Amino acid sequence: MILIDIILPRISKINNQDVIESQKIIQIRKAKDEQTLQKNQLKNKYNSMIFPSSYNYYPLNKIVKKEKFINYSSLNFTNFILCSEGYGIKKFTTDRFGFRNPDYLWDKKIDTVIIGDSFVEGQCVDYNETLSGILNSKNIRTINLSSGGNSSIHYASLAKIYLSYLKPKNVILLFFENDNSLVDSTELHSKYYKFLKKEDYITQENGKIRPSDKVNEFNLEIKNYLKSSKKNNFLFKMKVNLSKTKKYFLLTHIREYFYITFNKNEIFDTTKFAIDEVNDYCIVNNCNTYFGLLRSSSFWDPRFFYKKFKISLSKYLQEIDKELINFDDILKHDDKSNYAPKGPHYSIKSYEIISNRLINKINDAYK
């Protein structure tokens, strides 16, 4: 059964010629990127990216258990190598909370908050080509609370922590097609969401917000551990891989498959939590909500359940009198030009297309 659970999410990629070709492109790209990193000594100046989802696994989960605390963003004020998918190696410095924003935005009155995963964060393009970068360039002052590897439980937690401090006029929540998942429920972030207190994450002084002492202590523990850890050690790598197998022993994907197959048009609880956190906040505080769903490339990352997720997400949103923003008519998932030249994230053109639709939706709300 465990073997079936491992294979199940990969069935769509077995003997798939597009996937075989795409993996060859990625392998060649990674080899060239490694040469560039070594030649320019970038690894001495920048860190490998730490995503919030990393805190669920060895060795960082040891710090979570020690501190009895988990963060929902990356390390703050840290230089990171983000990714490379054909537009060059993208590097950036995180803001005071560990997100990909110009830090000064946290001291400004914010129009819009956008929440999502790596696609919404803007991998692997320059900041001015990301969704939030484009919105800011159109004078829609936007804070991006997205990180690679995020899923519905992260969206719910981020909304719970940050919205009441930022007080935006608009909140955009963009799901990705793999977000409706039972894997969320097996992660440490899900456990801590139940008892989450926003005051544990943010301190407000003189009208400005900054990370709490708890967050700073957690980040310092992570930084110190990463400096001292032997990441190339065989035993270290084995422990990392073993810590990621927990979801398979719980038969997460088999349970997920049966749920989606036999519970027609129903979304998982963590997806409901994310929607409800955003919607409930905006009902009380009179802000506009925008919910959308993004789709993966059939060439780079073919998946099973997009249509089912789209239907079930639309159904739940209709129950609370909200619409699902659809991008299928303007971004075809089987058109390679809509994705990066050497990877599964969106092309520069696609980020602009999505931004324009979001801007039109925001403008429509004020007519």
Image (spheres, helix red, strand yellow):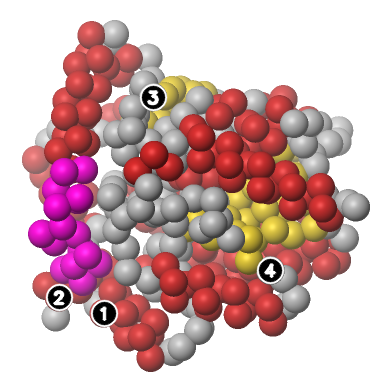
Mark nearer the N terminus (1 vs 2) = 2
Cα gap from disc 3 to disc 4, whole angstroms: 34 Å
Cα gap from disc 1 to disc 3, whole angstroms: 37 Å
Cα gap from disc 4 to disc 1, whole angstroms: 30 Å
> Mark 1 = which residue?
254
Q: Which mark is residue 87?
A: 3
Quarter placement of the N terminus: bottom left
- Please report contact status of discs 1 and 2: CB closer than 8 Å, yes or no: yes
Residue at disc 1, secondary structure: helix
Taking depth in this image into account, of 270 and 208 the one nearest to the observer is: 270
Q: Which residues are magenta?
A: 7-22
> Mark 4 = which residue?
323
Cα gap from disc 4 to disc 2, whole angstroms: 36 Å
Residue at disc 3, secondary structure: loop
Which residue corresponds to the image point at 21% horizontal and 71% vertical from the top-left? 8
Within-10-Å neighbours for mark 4: few <14, some 14–19, many 20+: some
Within-10-Å neighbours for mark 1: few <14, some 14–19, many 20+: some
Which quadrant of the view contains residue 231? top left
Cα gap from disc 1 to disc 2, whole angstroms: 8 Å
Which mark lies nearer to you, 4 or 1? Answer: 4
- Please report contact status of discs 3 and 4: CB closer than 8 Å, yes or no: no
- Please report contact status of discs 4 and 2: CB closer than 8 Å, yes or no: no
> Mark 2 = which residue?
4
